[in-house]
Image (cartoon, grey):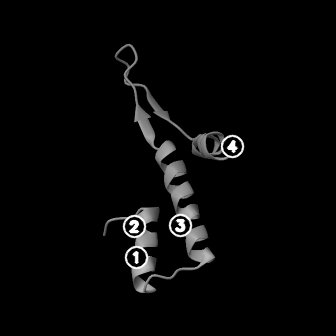
Amino acid sequence: MKEQTAVEWLEQQLFNKRGKFTKGDIDQAKAMEKEQIVDACNQNEFEDIDGLGIHETITKGEQYYNETYNK
């Protein structure tokens, strides 16, 4: 099963609740969006420096999110 984006989830809530959703639904969608952004930033990146095939894991997703979206 494909993972839903926050917007897809919110759209489903809107459909299921016949055009009405709560502040809780919006807060849940925002939390999902943040988690998805953080997870995307924490993905593995592969870099080939000097042919050595260096593997680097980026784990600064939370920092990226806060710097970008919590202005």
| Pointer 2 or 4: first along the chain | 2
Q: Is mark 2 on a helix, strand or loop?
A: helix
* Amino acid marked by disc 3: Ala
| Pointer 1 or 3: first along the chain | 1
* Amino acid marked by disc 4: Lys
Looking at the image, which is closer to me, 16 or 1? 16
| Pointer 4 or 3: first along the chain | 3
> Which residue matches tag 4?
71
Q: Is residue 53 visible in the rendered structure shown here? A: yes
* Amino acid marked by disc 2: Glu
> Which residue matches tag 3?
29
Quadrant for the C terminus in the image: top right
Mark 4 and mark 1: span between their CA atoms? 29 Å
User: How many residues crowd mark 1 within 10 Å: few (<14), some (14–19), many (20+)?
Assistant: some
Residue 18 point in image, percent of width and height: 43, 86
* Amino acid marked by disc 1: Gln
| Pointer 2 or 3: first along the chain | 2
Mark 2 and mark 1: span between their CA atoms? 6 Å
- Residue 42's place in the image compared with 17, above or below, is above
Mark 1 and mark 3: span between their CA atoms? 11 Å
* Residue at x 31%, y 70% (from the top left corner): 1
User: How many residues crowd mark 2 within 10 Å: few (<14), some (14–19), many (20+)?
Assistant: few
Q: Residue furthest left?
A: 1
Q: Is mark 1 on a helix, strand or loop?
A: helix
Residue 12 circle label: 1
Q: Is residue 42 visible in the rendered structure shown here? A: no
Indicate left or right for 1 with 38 as reference. Answer: left
Mark 2 and mark 3: span between their CA atoms? 9 Å
Q: Which residue lies furthest to the front in this view?
A: 19
Q: What element carries label 4?
A: loop
Residue 8 circle label: 2
